[in-house]
Image (cartoon, rainbow, N blue to C red):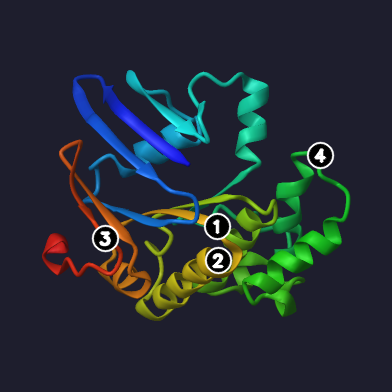
Amino acid sequence: MISFSHIQKQFGRHHVLNDVSFDIAQGEFLALIGKSGAGKSTLIHLLIGAETPDSGDVTVRGKSIPALSSKDLQLFRQSIGVVFQDFKLLNKKTVFENVAFALEVTGENAFIDQKVSEALFLVGLENMRDRFPPMLSGGEKQRVAIARAMVHSPVILIADEPTGNLDPENTIAIARLLRKLNLENGVTVFLTTHDPALISEVAPRILTLENGKITHDLKPGTVYPNYFG
């Protein structure tokens, strides 16, 4: 479904990615782990078309992302959901309005109430629709961000360090929610993290990224505790 093929990427003299190749199957839950600066976020940016590789290609269902026109790239981005560690919520909008905003900016104005209500139910926040982000805990904010990512019914959910700002209890809760979306909704999940608690909870396929290269490709459920140090 997703293919990174011989990706090279550098910024200035710094080689961030060096001949990186891997595939993600439809319905798979893959975790990319690596220390800060290893290139995890760069791979995310390549997948969503925010960056282009110096060489190599990124394809989704056989379509080259770097080759997409601006219009086609916008359409592609509507088929994926993205969650970041800093939530990126609008503090002056309610929970409902934050999720609805994702539909409004793409012109999807039909059935907004139904779609947003379904997304909030999916993440267990249907009773908090009228609250504002400053009234929420970190875990609740991330659930709003996940609801916003899911409101388009994406086929791919990208989670870039989604528990980086959360305590251990909320980390486990978000991990279980991501696994639920993967198993029950059939969403392909591409996760980046350096959080061993998150890895232990979801037991995904694991790729390790070190010095711009993929160093391990471990099957789901593999225990790899020494990587995090």
Amino acid under label 3? Lys
Q: Secondary structure at mark 4?
A: loop
Cα distance in 3D space between marks 3 and 2: 20 Å
Q: Looking at the image, is mark 2 or mark 4 earlier in the sequence? A: 4
**Mark 4 or mark 1, which is nearer to you?**
1
Residue 107: numbered disc: 4
Cα distance in 3D space between marks 4 and 1: 23 Å
Q: Can you identify the residue that label 3 sits on?
A: 219
Q: Residues within 10 Å of mark 3 (few under 14, many from 20)?
A: few
Q: Point out residue 183 in the picture as x, y percentages from the top left corner.
A: 52, 68
> Which quadrant of the view contains residue 166?
bottom left
Q: Looking at the image, is mark 3 or mark 2 earlier in the sequence? A: 2
Q: Can you identify the residue that label 1 sits on?
A: 187
Label 2 with label 4: CB-CB less than 8 Å: no
Q: Residues within 10 Å of mark 2 (few under 14, many from 20)?
A: some
Cα distance in 3D space between marks 3 and 1: 19 Å
Is 155 placed above or below 4 here? below
